[in-house]
């Protein structure tokens, strides 16, 4: 009797699962039912991929020789959206239909040799994205993790007989952000660019007042090294052989449904405590985002298609054997100005680095930094020519700070017109106030 009682819940569970399987038709059957009895369905195929290299999608399409119909499903939310259109040769044209049968978005592209490549755009042409998918053969495993091709790499090399380092992070659609430091001049440059599917990349430095521009290019066909060719606007040219010192996959969280979407990228390190700290910051942001989206209470209408959007991505300022610094950028479509949060992590202790870890107790760092910014900001060419820029700088200030080899970088938040502004305070300016055993002591000359 005891054995029967123990097995009963298990039997009921499997019976329930079997009943659910009978009640929910396979996706290919659902797609076939979208055609009329007079239509001859030539094939039904399934595709998997991502929108904007972020949101995991599954698409099932049927074809009767002209008409193409099917279902688009966001994998995280399990939302199904009906598709209706045509396939003429490789040219694919589909409409998304909401629950009332109204067109909410369009998919225009090609379907050729098992690959679906198309542009997705909402019905009023205000929001768009890129759709890349591949046909799912029987037995093929789906790719769920949106961070499987996102990474942050640290490279070391030699330039002019001195150490050089390059940090690169690959974000969505091959976008690259990073930082280049050369020990010969003890200068750090923010760099940005793009990497192709074949591993070739191009980068350029972010302009700084009074500084030459820098262009870099190379290839990452070899996973452990890269030869970077660079040139500057003052005519200098050279190359550096970089060796990969450390590589980490970016953490990634994504979600999308008819009304909303959010995507989050964040770095990881070899320091478990540092990773825990970053994950806690991201978790808090996710919870706030979910609450904000739920609070909007929008109805499913074509005009509301994907109007609630949010993103987080990291920018790394410095990565050494001890310091990992940068900031998280936050954007959404329902708040005011962009938000950001800096991080300066001690890879040896696993703790965030604060002013108390850097400066003597008698030093008022916030006031000193504010005064430094007041004196240095007029050197920016925009300062003299743009009244709005001056007002913004004075009011917004430089609330972010990150540690680097060549000094402490202070930054504004992102502005839709003026971008993000930075100032680097050389350690030579701060020597009287720094603690002798601070985490940046080895970089202070």
Image (spheres, rainbow, N blue to C red):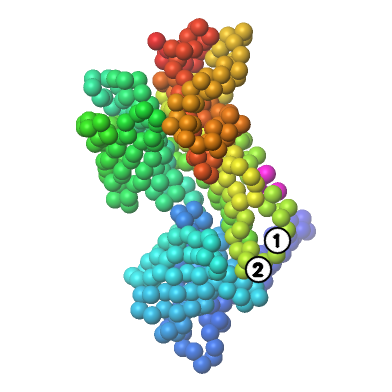
Q: Mark 2 and mark 1 in contact? Answer it, CB < 8 Å.
A: yes
Stretch of the chain drawn in magenta: 287-291
Question: Residue 374 appears in which quarter of the rendering?
Answer: top right
| Mark 2, other Cα within 10 Å: few <14 / some 14–19 / many ≥20 | some
Give me the residue at 44% from left, 17% from top: 426
Give me the residue at 41% from left, 24% from top: 320
Query: For residue 289: magenta?
Result: yes
- Can residue 269 be seen at all in this image of the molecule? no
Residue at the disc numbered 1: 298
Question: Residue 86 appears in which quarter of the rendering?
Answer: bottom left
* CA separation in Å, label 2 and label 1: 9 Å
Image quadrant occupied by the N terminus: bottom right
**Element type at mark 2:** loop
Horizontally, residue 243 falls left or right of residue 137, namely: left
20, 431: nearer the viewer = 431
Measured as percent of width and height from the top left, residue 63 is found at 45, 80
Name the outermost residue toward the bottom. Answer: 38
Residue at the disc numbered 2: 301
Q: Is residue 421 above or below residue 133?
A: above
């Amino acid at each position: 009797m005891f054995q029967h009682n123990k097995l009963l819940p298990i039997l009921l569970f499997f019976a329930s699962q079997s009943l659910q399987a009978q009640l929910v038709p396979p996706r290919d059957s659902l797609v076939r039912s979208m055609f009329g009895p007079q239509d001859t369905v030539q094939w039904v195929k399934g595709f998997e991929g991502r929108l904007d290299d972020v949101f995991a999608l599954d698409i099932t399409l049927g074809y009767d020789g002209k008409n193409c119909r099917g279902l688009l499903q966001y994998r995280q939310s399990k939302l199904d959206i009906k598709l209706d259109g045509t396939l003429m040769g490789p040219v694919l044209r589909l409409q998304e239909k909401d629950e009332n049968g109204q067109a909410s978005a369009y998919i225009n592209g090609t379907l050729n040799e098992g690959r679906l490549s198309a542009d997705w755009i909402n019905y009023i042409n205000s929001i768009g994205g890129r759709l890349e998918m591949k046909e799912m053969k029987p037995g093929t495993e789906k790719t769920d993790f949106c961070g499987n091709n996102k990474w942050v790499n640290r490279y070391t090399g030699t330039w002019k007989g001195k150490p050089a380092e390059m940090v690169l992070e690959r974000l969505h659609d091959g976008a690259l952000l990073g930082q280049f430091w050369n020990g010969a001049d003890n200068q750090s440059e923010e760099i940005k660019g793009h990497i192709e599917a074949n591993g070739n990349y191009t980068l350029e430095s972010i302009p700084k007042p009074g500084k030459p521009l820098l262009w870099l290019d190379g290839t990452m066909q070899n996973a452990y090294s890269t030869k970077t060719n660079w040139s500057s606007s003052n005519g200098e040219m050279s190359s550096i052989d970089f060796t990969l010192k450390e590589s980490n996959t970016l953490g990634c969280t994504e979600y999308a449904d008819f009304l909303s979407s959010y995507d989050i990228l964040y770095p990881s390190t070899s320091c478990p405590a540092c990773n825990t700290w970053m994950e806690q910051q991201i978790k808090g942001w996710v919870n706030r985002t979910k609450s904000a989206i739920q609070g909007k209470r929008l109805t499913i209408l074509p005009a509301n298609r994907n109007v609630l959007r949010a993103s987080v991505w990291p920018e790394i300022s410095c990565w050494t054997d001890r310091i990992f610094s940068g900031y998280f950028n936050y954007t959404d479509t329902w708040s005011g100005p962009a938000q950001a949060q800096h991080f300066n992590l001690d890879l040896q202790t696993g703790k965030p680095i604060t002013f108390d870890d850097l400066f003597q107790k008698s030093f008022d760092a916030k006031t000193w930094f504010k005064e430094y910014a007041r004196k240095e900001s007029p050197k920016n060419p925009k300062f003299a020519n743009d009244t709005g820029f001056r007002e913004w700088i004075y009011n917004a200030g430089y609330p972010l700070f990150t540690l680097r080899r060549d000094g402490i970088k202070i930054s504004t938040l992102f502005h839709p017109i003026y971008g993000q502004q930075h100032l680097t305070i050389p350690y030579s300016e701060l020597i009287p106030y720094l603690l002798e055993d601070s985490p940046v002591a080895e970089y202070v000359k």
